[in-house]
Image: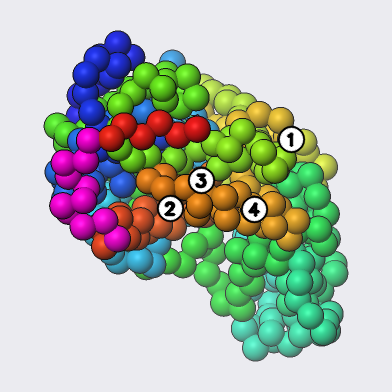
Protein backbone atom coordinates (compact mmCIF):
# COMPACT_ATOMS: atom_id res chain seq x y z
CA UNK A 1 0.00 0.00 0.00
CA UNK A 2 1.32 3.40 -0.95
CA UNK A 3 -0.06 6.54 0.63
CA UNK A 4 -0.52 9.20 -1.97
CA UNK A 5 -1.82 12.72 -2.08
CA UNK A 6 -4.21 14.48 -4.38
CA UNK A 7 -1.57 15.81 -6.77
CA UNK A 8 -0.04 12.39 -7.19
CA UNK A 9 -3.41 10.76 -7.93
CA UNK A 10 -4.14 13.52 -10.38
CA UNK A 11 -0.89 13.04 -12.26
CA UNK A 12 -1.08 10.37 -14.90
CA UNK A 13 -2.12 7.17 -13.22
CA UNK A 14 -5.00 5.21 -14.69
CA UNK A 15 -6.56 3.10 -11.96
CA UNK A 16 -8.57 -0.04 -12.72
CA UNK A 17 -10.77 0.68 -9.71
CA UNK A 18 -11.48 3.71 -7.61
CA UNK A 19 -12.82 2.42 -4.28
CA UNK A 20 -14.64 4.89 -2.06
CA UNK A 21 -14.45 4.13 1.67
CA UNK A 22 -11.62 2.39 3.52
CA UNK A 23 -13.83 0.46 5.96
CA UNK A 24 -14.40 -3.29 5.73
CA UNK A 25 -16.54 -3.06 2.60
CA UNK A 26 -13.98 -1.12 0.55
CA UNK A 27 -10.78 -2.61 1.99
CA UNK A 28 -11.82 -6.24 1.47
CA UNK A 29 -12.69 -5.73 -2.16
CA UNK A 30 -9.53 -3.63 -2.69
CA UNK A 31 -7.41 -6.43 -1.22
CA UNK A 32 -9.07 -9.09 -3.39
CA UNK A 33 -8.86 -7.14 -6.63
CA UNK A 34 -5.20 -6.24 -6.04
CA UNK A 35 -3.95 -9.60 -4.78
CA UNK A 36 -6.08 -11.97 -6.86
CA UNK A 37 -6.65 -10.04 -10.09
CA UNK A 38 -3.65 -7.71 -10.16
CA UNK A 39 -5.84 -4.65 -10.45
CA UNK A 40 -4.47 -1.22 -9.78
CA UNK A 41 -6.54 0.30 -7.01
CA UNK A 42 -7.03 3.76 -5.59
CA UNK A 43 -8.72 3.47 -2.19
CA UNK A 44 -9.97 6.77 -0.81
CA UNK A 45 -11.63 7.89 2.40
CA UNK A 46 -12.85 11.29 3.44
CA UNK A 47 -11.68 10.63 7.01
CA UNK A 48 -8.04 10.91 8.05
CA UNK A 49 -7.74 7.20 8.84
CA UNK A 50 -8.48 3.72 7.51
CA UNK A 51 -10.80 1.11 9.06
CA UNK A 52 -14.11 2.97 8.69
CA UNK A 53 -16.23 2.70 11.83
CA UNK A 54 -14.02 -0.01 13.28
CA UNK A 55 -11.02 2.33 13.59
CA UNK A 56 -9.18 1.92 16.89
CA UNK A 57 -6.26 3.79 18.41
CA UNK A 58 -4.58 4.60 21.72
CA UNK A 59 -6.12 7.55 23.55
CA UNK A 60 -4.03 10.18 25.36
CA UNK A 61 -3.82 7.88 28.40
CA UNK A 62 -2.40 5.02 26.35
CA UNK A 63 -5.60 2.98 26.37
CA UNK A 64 -6.78 1.33 23.15
CA UNK A 65 -10.24 2.68 22.27
CA UNK A 66 -12.69 2.34 19.38
CA UNK A 67 -13.41 5.83 18.08
CA UNK A 68 -16.85 4.97 16.71
CA UNK A 69 -18.11 2.76 19.52
CA UNK A 70 -17.30 -0.76 20.67
CA UNK A 71 -16.75 -3.36 17.93
CA UNK A 72 -16.82 -7.03 18.84
CA UNK A 73 -16.09 -9.49 16.08
CA UNK A 74 -18.27 -12.60 15.88
CA UNK A 75 -19.27 -14.87 13.03
CA UNK A 76 -20.46 -18.32 12.08
CA UNK A 77 -18.96 -17.96 8.61
CA UNK A 78 -15.73 -19.96 8.48
CA UNK A 79 -14.76 -18.44 5.14
CA UNK A 80 -14.97 -14.92 6.61
CA UNK A 81 -12.94 -15.86 9.67
CA UNK A 82 -10.33 -17.67 7.55
CA UNK A 83 -10.12 -14.75 5.15
CA UNK A 84 -9.47 -12.18 7.93
CA UNK A 85 -7.03 -14.54 9.65
CA UNK A 86 -4.57 -13.81 6.83
CA UNK A 87 -4.20 -10.30 8.21
CA UNK A 88 -4.29 -10.71 11.98
CA UNK A 89 -3.83 -13.03 14.91
CA UNK A 90 -6.78 -13.18 17.25
CA UNK A 91 -7.52 -12.81 20.91
CA UNK A 92 -10.41 -15.10 21.83
CA UNK A 93 -13.06 -13.03 23.50
CA UNK A 94 -16.69 -13.72 24.43
CA UNK A 95 -18.70 -10.61 25.13
CA UNK A 96 -21.04 -10.32 28.11
CA UNK A 97 -23.57 -7.57 28.80
CA UNK A 98 -25.57 -6.61 31.88
CA UNK A 99 -28.75 -4.57 31.71
CA UNK A 100 -29.51 -2.02 34.42
CA UNK A 101 -33.13 -2.84 35.28
CA UNK A 102 -35.08 -2.08 38.48
CA UNK A 103 -31.89 -1.02 40.25
CA UNK A 104 -30.09 -4.29 39.50
CA UNK A 105 -27.55 -5.49 36.95
CA UNK A 106 -28.95 -8.56 35.18
CA UNK A 107 -27.69 -10.51 32.16
CA UNK A 108 -28.98 -9.63 28.69
CA UNK A 109 -29.91 -11.57 26.47
CA UNK A 110 -32.56 -12.61 28.98
CA UNK A 111 -31.78 -16.09 30.28
CA UNK A 112 -32.44 -18.24 33.32
CA UNK A 113 -30.00 -16.19 35.43
CA UNK A 114 -31.83 -12.99 34.46
CA UNK A 115 -35.28 -14.20 35.47
CA UNK A 116 -34.13 -15.84 38.68
CA UNK A 117 -32.24 -12.72 39.79
CA UNK A 118 -34.99 -10.27 38.84
CA UNK A 119 -37.81 -12.14 40.50
CA UNK A 120 -35.89 -13.87 43.32
CA UNK A 121 -36.78 -17.27 41.86
CA UNK A 122 -34.94 -20.53 41.49
CA UNK A 123 -36.44 -21.83 38.25
CA UNK A 124 -34.90 -24.52 36.09
CA UNK A 125 -35.00 -24.43 32.26
CA UNK A 126 -38.36 -26.21 31.95
CA UNK A 127 -39.90 -23.96 34.55
CA UNK A 128 -38.54 -20.89 32.79
CA UNK A 129 -40.09 -22.05 29.55
CA UNK A 130 -43.44 -22.38 31.33
CA UNK A 131 -42.91 -18.97 32.96
CA UNK A 132 -42.32 -17.30 29.60
CA UNK A 133 -45.20 -19.17 27.97
CA UNK A 134 -47.51 -17.79 30.65
CA UNK A 135 -46.35 -14.24 29.85
CA UNK A 136 -46.11 -14.47 26.03
CA UNK A 137 -48.80 -12.66 24.03
CA UNK A 138 -50.38 -14.66 21.22
CA UNK A 139 -50.24 -12.72 17.96
CA UNK A 140 -51.48 -13.66 14.49
CA UNK A 141 -48.57 -12.00 12.76
CA UNK A 142 -45.07 -10.96 13.78
CA UNK A 143 -44.39 -7.77 11.88
CA UNK A 144 -42.64 -5.33 14.16
CA UNK A 145 -39.89 -5.17 16.75
CA UNK A 146 -42.60 -4.98 19.40
CA UNK A 147 -44.38 -8.10 18.12
CA UNK A 148 -41.29 -10.24 18.05
CA UNK A 149 -40.53 -9.56 21.70
CA UNK A 150 -44.00 -9.55 23.30
CA UNK A 151 -44.86 -12.78 21.50
CA UNK A 152 -41.90 -14.46 23.19
CA UNK A 153 -41.59 -12.90 26.65
CA UNK A 154 -44.72 -10.80 27.24
CA UNK A 155 -45.30 -7.12 27.88
CA UNK A 156 -43.68 -6.65 31.25
CA UNK A 157 -40.23 -7.87 30.24
CA UNK A 158 -40.60 -6.15 26.86
CA UNK A 159 -41.18 -2.85 28.61
CA UNK A 160 -38.33 -3.34 31.06
CA UNK A 161 -35.67 -4.44 28.58
CA UNK A 162 -36.65 -3.39 25.07
CA UNK A 163 -39.11 -0.54 24.82
CA UNK A 164 -37.05 2.25 26.41
CA UNK A 165 -33.74 1.11 24.93
CA UNK A 166 -35.19 0.88 21.43
CA UNK A 167 -36.87 4.29 21.66
CA UNK A 168 -33.58 5.85 22.68
CA UNK A 169 -31.51 4.00 20.11
CA UNK A 170 -33.74 4.60 17.11
CA UNK A 171 -35.93 7.55 18.07
CA UNK A 172 -38.86 5.29 17.21
CA UNK A 173 -41.20 3.03 19.11
CA UNK A 174 -40.43 -0.69 18.55
CA UNK A 175 -43.83 -0.98 16.88
CA UNK A 176 -42.45 1.29 14.11
CA UNK A 177 -39.40 -0.87 13.36
CA UNK A 178 -39.00 -4.11 11.44
CA UNK A 179 -39.01 -7.27 13.53
CA UNK A 180 -35.40 -7.94 12.52
CA UNK A 181 -34.08 -5.22 14.85
CA UNK A 182 -35.03 -6.66 18.25
CA UNK A 183 -34.92 -10.21 16.83
CA UNK A 184 -31.13 -9.80 17.01
CA UNK A 185 -31.46 -10.37 20.77
CA UNK A 186 -32.53 -13.93 21.61
CA UNK A 187 -34.16 -15.24 24.80
CA UNK A 188 -32.58 -18.31 26.39
CA UNK A 189 -33.83 -20.79 28.90
CA UNK A 190 -30.32 -21.91 29.85
CA UNK A 191 -27.70 -20.03 31.86
CA UNK A 192 -25.61 -18.81 28.90
CA UNK A 193 -24.72 -15.18 29.71
CA UNK A 194 -22.82 -14.54 26.47
CA UNK A 195 -24.12 -11.81 24.16
CA UNK A 196 -23.25 -13.86 21.06
CA UNK A 197 -23.17 -17.60 20.48
CA UNK A 198 -21.30 -17.61 17.15
CA UNK A 199 -18.64 -20.22 16.46
CA UNK A 200 -15.91 -17.59 16.07
CA UNK A 201 -15.76 -14.80 18.64
CA UNK A 202 -12.48 -12.93 18.74
CA UNK A 203 -10.78 -9.55 18.59
CA UNK A 204 -7.88 -8.77 16.24
CA UNK A 205 -4.86 -9.15 18.50
CA UNK A 206 -3.21 -5.84 17.55
CA UNK A 207 -6.53 -4.06 16.96
CA UNK A 208 -8.67 -3.39 13.88
CA UNK A 209 -6.50 -0.62 12.45
CA UNK A 210 -3.43 -2.87 12.42
CA UNK A 211 -5.47 -5.58 10.69
CA UNK A 212 -6.56 -3.08 8.02
CA UNK A 213 -2.96 -1.95 7.51
CA UNK A 214 -2.06 -5.54 6.71
CA UNK A 215 -5.12 -6.03 4.50
CA UNK A 216 -4.38 -3.10 2.26
CA UNK A 217 -0.59 -3.42 2.27
CA UNK A 218 -0.47 -4.73 -1.32
CA UNK A 219 1.74 -2.56 -3.57
CA UNK A 220 -1.03 -2.29 -6.15
CA UNK A 221 -3.24 -0.46 -3.65
CA UNK A 222 -2.78 3.29 -3.35
CA UNK A 223 -4.46 5.00 -0.43
CA UNK A 224 -5.63 8.59 -0.31
CA UNK A 225 -7.08 9.92 2.96
CA UNK A 226 -8.94 13.19 3.58
CA UNK A 227 -10.42 12.74 0.11
CA UNK A 228 -14.15 13.13 -0.43
CA UNK A 229 -15.35 11.36 -3.57
CA UNK A 230 -17.38 14.35 -4.71
CA UNK A 231 -14.33 16.58 -4.52
CA UNK A 232 -11.75 14.35 -6.18
CA UNK A 233 -13.74 12.24 -8.65
CA UNK A 234 -13.20 14.41 -11.68
CA UNK A 235 -9.46 14.66 -11.17
CA UNK A 236 -8.81 10.92 -11.00
CA UNK A 237 -8.64 8.55 -13.94
CA UNK A 238 -10.25 5.20 -13.32
CA UNK A 239 -12.14 2.53 -15.18
CA UNK A 240 -14.58 1.31 -12.56
CA UNK A 241 -15.94 2.49 -9.29
CA UNK A 242 -16.82 0.70 -6.05
CA UNK A 243 -18.78 2.90 -3.69
CA UNK A 244 -19.21 2.12 0.02
CA UNK A 245 -20.47 5.50 1.22
CA UNK A 246 -24.21 6.21 1.59
CA UNK A 247 -25.93 5.30 -1.69
CA UNK A 248 -28.30 8.28 -1.49
CA UNK A 249 -25.35 10.68 -1.34
CA UNK A 250 -23.85 9.14 -4.48
CA UNK A 251 -27.04 10.03 -6.35
CA UNK A 252 -27.24 13.51 -4.78
CA UNK A 253 -30.33 12.49 -2.82
CA UNK A 254 -32.42 12.55 -6.00
CA UNK A 255 -35.26 10.58 -4.38
CA UNK A 256 -34.80 12.16 -0.96
CA UNK A 257 -32.57 11.33 2.02
CA UNK A 258 -32.36 7.83 3.43
CA UNK A 259 -32.75 8.11 7.19
CA UNK A 260 -29.80 7.05 9.34
CA UNK A 261 -29.37 7.02 13.09
CA UNK A 262 -26.27 8.63 14.49
CA UNK A 263 -24.55 8.45 17.88
CA UNK A 264 -22.48 10.79 19.97
CA UNK A 265 -19.70 8.92 21.76
CA UNK A 266 -18.55 10.33 25.09
CA UNK A 267 -15.33 8.89 26.48
CA UNK A 268 -14.37 8.95 30.13
CA UNK A 269 -11.06 7.84 31.62
CA UNK A 270 -10.85 6.95 35.29
CA UNK A 271 -7.87 6.46 37.57
CA UNK A 272 -8.96 2.91 38.38
CA UNK A 273 -8.05 -0.44 36.92
CA UNK A 274 -11.66 -1.39 36.19
CA UNK A 275 -14.94 0.47 36.76
CA UNK A 276 -17.72 -1.77 35.42
CA UNK A 277 -18.69 -5.31 36.45
CA UNK A 278 -18.67 -6.37 32.80
CA UNK A 279 -17.62 -5.09 29.36
CA UNK A 280 -20.92 -3.44 28.51
CA UNK A 281 -23.89 -2.22 30.49
CA UNK A 282 -27.16 -1.58 28.67
CA UNK A 283 -29.48 1.10 30.04
CA UNK A 284 -33.09 0.53 28.94
CA UNK A 285 -34.43 2.97 31.55
CA UNK A 286 -34.13 6.74 32.02
CA UNK A 287 -30.44 7.34 31.33
CA UNK A 288 -29.83 9.49 28.22
CA UNK A 289 -27.31 6.95 26.86
CA UNK A 290 -28.08 3.41 25.69
CA UNK A 291 -24.94 1.65 26.83
CA UNK A 292 -21.48 2.06 28.31
CA UNK A 293 -18.51 -0.08 27.36
CA UNK A 294 -15.17 -0.48 29.10
CA UNK A 295 -12.58 -1.14 26.41
CA UNK A 296 -10.05 -3.11 28.43
CA UNK A 297 -12.47 -6.04 28.66
CA UNK A 298 -12.53 -6.20 24.85
CA UNK A 299 -8.84 -5.68 24.21
CA UNK A 300 -7.37 -7.46 27.24
CA UNK A 301 -5.03 -4.51 27.76
CA UNK A 302 -3.41 -4.15 31.19
CA UNK A 303 -3.32 -0.54 32.42
CA UNK A 304 -3.76 1.22 35.76
CA UNK A 305 -6.41 3.50 34.22
CA UNK A 306 -9.55 2.58 32.28
CA UNK A 307 -11.59 4.22 29.51
CA UNK A 308 -15.35 3.84 29.10
CA UNK A 309 -17.53 5.07 26.23
CA UNK A 310 -21.15 6.16 26.61
CA UNK A 311 -23.40 6.10 23.53
CA UNK A 312 -25.93 8.92 23.06
CA UNK A 313 -28.08 8.21 19.99
CA UNK A 314 -29.16 11.17 17.88
CA UNK A 315 -30.76 12.00 14.55
CA UNK A 316 -28.01 14.25 13.18
CA UNK A 317 -24.38 13.37 12.61
CA UNK A 318 -22.37 10.70 10.83
CA UNK A 319 -24.62 7.99 9.35
CA UNK A 320 -24.07 4.93 11.56
CA UNK A 321 -27.27 2.88 11.46
CA UNK A 322 -29.59 2.35 8.48
CA UNK A 323 -33.08 2.30 10.02
CA UNK A 324 -34.89 -0.96 9.18
CA UNK A 325 -38.51 -0.13 8.37
CA UNK A 326 -40.71 -0.57 5.35
CA UNK A 327 -40.76 2.98 4.00
CA UNK A 328 -36.97 3.19 4.17
CA UNK A 329 -36.58 -0.14 2.37
CA UNK A 330 -38.85 1.17 -0.38
CA UNK A 331 -36.84 4.36 -0.75
CA UNK A 332 -33.62 2.34 -0.82
CA UNK A 333 -35.14 0.12 -3.52
CA UNK A 334 -35.50 3.19 -5.74
CA UNK A 335 -31.80 3.94 -5.35
CA UNK A 336 -30.93 0.29 -5.89
CA UNK A 337 -32.92 0.24 -9.14
CA UNK A 338 -31.18 3.39 -10.30
CA UNK A 339 -27.81 1.87 -9.41
CA UNK A 340 -28.60 -1.18 -11.56
CA UNK A 341 -28.94 1.05 -14.62
CA UNK A 342 -25.41 2.47 -14.51
CA UNK A 343 -22.43 0.55 -15.80
CA UNK A 344 -19.12 0.01 -14.05
CA UNK A 345 -20.28 1.22 -10.66
CA UNK A 346 -20.80 -1.20 -7.77
CA UNK A 347 -22.25 -0.57 -4.33
CA UNK A 348 -21.38 -2.57 -1.23
CA UNK A 349 -21.29 -2.22 2.56
CA UNK A 350 -23.58 -1.04 5.31
CA UNK A 351 -24.05 2.42 3.80
CA UNK A 352 -23.71 1.43 0.14
CA UNK A 353 -26.55 -1.09 0.38
CA UNK A 354 -28.43 0.43 3.33
CA UNK A 355 -28.35 -2.76 5.40
CA UNK A 356 -28.04 -3.12 9.18
CA UNK A 357 -25.05 -5.45 8.76
CA UNK A 358 -22.47 -6.61 11.26
CA UNK A 359 -18.80 -6.58 10.29
CA UNK A 360 -18.74 -10.23 9.22
CA UNK A 361 -21.76 -9.71 6.96
CA UNK A 362 -20.03 -6.79 5.27
CA UNK A 363 -16.89 -8.87 4.72
CA UNK A 364 -19.01 -11.68 3.24
CA UNK A 365 -20.85 -9.19 1.03
CA UNK A 366 -17.61 -7.73 -0.36
CA UNK A 367 -16.11 -11.19 -0.94
CA UNK A 368 -19.26 -12.05 -2.90
CA UNK A 369 -19.01 -8.82 -4.87
CA UNK A 370 -15.43 -9.66 -5.79
CA UNK A 371 -16.54 -13.09 -7.05
CA UNK A 372 -19.37 -11.51 -9.03
CA UNK A 373 -16.99 -9.04 -10.63
CA UNK A 374 -14.64 -11.83 -11.59
CA UNK A 375 -17.47 -13.92 -13.06
CA UNK A 376 -19.23 -11.17 -14.96
CA UNK A 377 -16.12 -9.39 -16.12
CA UNK A 378 -13.68 -11.83 -17.67
CA UNK A 379 -10.05 -10.91 -17.21
CA UNK A 380 -9.56 -9.77 -20.79
CA UNK A 381 -12.28 -7.16 -20.60
CA UNK A 382 -10.99 -5.95 -17.24
CA UNK A 383 -7.46 -5.43 -18.52
CA UNK A 384 -6.40 -3.16 -21.28
CA UNK A 385 -9.47 -0.96 -21.17
CA UNK A 386 -8.57 2.59 -21.96
CA UNK A 387 -11.61 4.72 -21.42
CA UNK A 388 -11.85 6.99 -18.41
CA UNK A 389 -15.11 6.59 -16.62
CA UNK A 390 -16.27 9.74 -14.91
CA UNK A 391 -19.67 9.22 -13.26
CA UNK A 392 -22.21 11.94 -13.77
P1 LIG B 1 -17.98 2.01 7.22
O1 LIG B 1 -17.14 1.39 8.26
O2 LIG B 1 -18.96 3.06 7.63
O3 LIG B 1 -17.00 2.60 6.10
C1 LIG B 1 -17.45 3.46 5.08
C2 LIG B 1 -16.34 4.47 4.84
O4 LIG B 1 -16.69 5.26 3.69
C3 LIG B 1 -16.15 5.45 5.99
O5 LIG B 1 -14.83 5.39 6.48
C4 LIG B 1 -16.48 6.81 5.39
O6 LIG B 1 -15.65 7.85 5.88
C5 LIG B 1 -16.23 6.56 3.92
N1 LIG B 1 -16.99 7.47 3.05
C6 LIG B 1 -18.31 7.70 3.04
N2 LIG B 1 -18.63 8.61 2.09
C7 LIG B 1 -17.48 8.97 1.49
C8 LIG B 1 -17.14 9.87 0.44
N3 LIG B 1 -18.08 10.61 -0.17
N4 LIG B 1 -15.85 10.00 0.07
C9 LIG B 1 -14.87 9.28 0.68
N5 LIG B 1 -15.14 8.39 1.70
C10 LIG B 1 -16.41 8.25 2.09
N6 LIG B 1 -20.46 -4.87 13.88
C11 LIG B 1 -20.08 -6.04 14.47
O7 LIG B 1 -19.92 -7.06 13.79
N7 LIG B 1 -19.86 -6.10 15.83
C12 LIG B 1 -20.01 -5.01 16.64
O8 LIG B 1 -19.79 -5.09 17.86
C13 LIG B 1 -20.41 -3.78 16.04
N8 LIG B 1 -20.59 -2.69 16.80
C14 LIG B 1 -20.97 -1.52 16.20
C15 LIG B 1 -21.13 -0.40 17.03
C16 LIG B 1 -21.51 0.81 16.45
C17 LIG B 1 -21.71 2.02 17.34
C18 LIG B 1 -21.72 0.90 15.04
C19 LIG B 1 -22.12 2.21 14.42
C20 LIG B 1 -21.57 -0.21 14.24
C21 LIG B 1 -21.19 -1.43 14.81
N9 LIG B 1 -20.99 -2.57 14.03
C22 LIG B 1 -20.63 -3.75 14.63
C23 LIG B 1 -21.19 -2.53 12.56
C24 LIG B 1 -19.89 -2.25 11.82
O9 LIG B 1 -19.41 -0.97 12.17
C25 LIG B 1 -20.17 -2.30 10.31
O10 LIG B 1 -20.74 -3.53 9.94
C26 LIG B 1 -18.94 -2.10 9.45
O11 LIG B 1 -17.99 -1.24 10.00
C27 LIG B 1 -19.39 -1.57 8.09
O12 LIG B 1 -18.29 -1.40 7.23
P2 LIG B 1 -18.47 -0.53 5.91
O13 LIG B 1 -17.15 -0.53 5.23
O14 LIG B 1 -19.65 -0.99 5.17
O15 LIG B 1 -18.84 0.93 6.42
N1 LIG C 1 -32.18 -3.97 22.31
C1 LIG C 1 -32.93 -3.57 23.39
N2 LIG C 1 -32.41 -3.73 24.64
C2 LIG C 1 -31.17 -4.23 24.85
C3 LIG C 1 -30.40 -4.62 23.74
C4 LIG C 1 -30.93 -4.47 22.47
O1 LIG C 1 -34.04 -3.09 23.24
O2 LIG C 1 -30.74 -4.35 26.01
C5 LIG C 1 -32.76 -3.79 20.94
C6 LIG C 1 -32.53 -2.38 20.42
O3 LIG C 1 -33.58 -2.05 19.56
C7 LIG C 1 -31.23 -2.55 19.67
C8 LIG C 1 -31.45 -3.90 19.01
O4 LIG C 1 -32.13 -4.67 20.03
O5 LIG C 1 -31.05 -1.52 18.73
C9 LIG C 1 -30.22 -4.61 18.55
O6 LIG C 1 -29.30 -4.68 19.63
P1 LIG C 1 -27.72 -4.83 19.37
O7 LIG C 1 -27.06 -4.93 20.70
O8 LIG C 1 -27.52 -5.92 18.41
O9 LIG C 1 -27.40 -3.43 18.69
P2 LIG C 1 -26.05 -2.83 18.04
O10 LIG C 1 -24.90 -3.51 18.73
O11 LIG C 1 -26.13 -3.11 16.58
O12 LIG C 1 -26.14 -1.38 18.36
Q: Is residue 325 left or right of residue 43?
A: right
Image coordinates for residue 329, horizontal then vertical, percent: 67, 57
Start-end of magenta stretch: 376-386
> Dot 1 corresponds to which residue?
315
- Whole-number angstrom distance, CA of label 4 to CA of label 1: 23 Å
* Mark 1 neighbour class, 10 Å CA radius: few under 14, some 14 to 19, many 20 or more: some
Please state which of residues 81 and 125 is positioned toward the viewer in this rendering: 81
Q: Nearer the viewer, mark 3 or mark 1?
A: 3
Local crowd size for mark 2, using a 10 Å CA cut-off: few (<14), some (14–19), many (≥20): many
Q: Residue at x 25, y 32 (%)?
A: 15
Tag 4 residue:
334
Towards the viewer: 272 or 241: 241
Q: Looking at the image, do the residues carrying marks 2 and 1 touch, with CB atoms under 8 Å apart?
A: no
Query: Which tag is nearer the camera, tag 2 or tag 3?
Result: 3
- Give whichever of 77, 379 is nearer the camera: 379
Cα separation, mark 3 vs mark 1, equals 19 Å
Residue 316 x/y as whole percent: 71, 30
Amino acid sequence: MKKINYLHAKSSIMYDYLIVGAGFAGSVVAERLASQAEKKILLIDKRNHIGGNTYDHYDEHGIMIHKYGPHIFHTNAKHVFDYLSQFTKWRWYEHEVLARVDGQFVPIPINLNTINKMYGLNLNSDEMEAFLASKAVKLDQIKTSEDVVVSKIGRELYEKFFKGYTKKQWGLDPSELDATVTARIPTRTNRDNRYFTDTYQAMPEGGYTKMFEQMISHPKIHLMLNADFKEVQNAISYKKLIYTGPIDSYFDYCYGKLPYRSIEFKFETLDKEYIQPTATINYPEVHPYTRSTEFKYLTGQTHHKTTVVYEYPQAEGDPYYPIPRRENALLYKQYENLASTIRDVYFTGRLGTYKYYNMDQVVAQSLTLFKRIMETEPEKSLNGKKHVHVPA
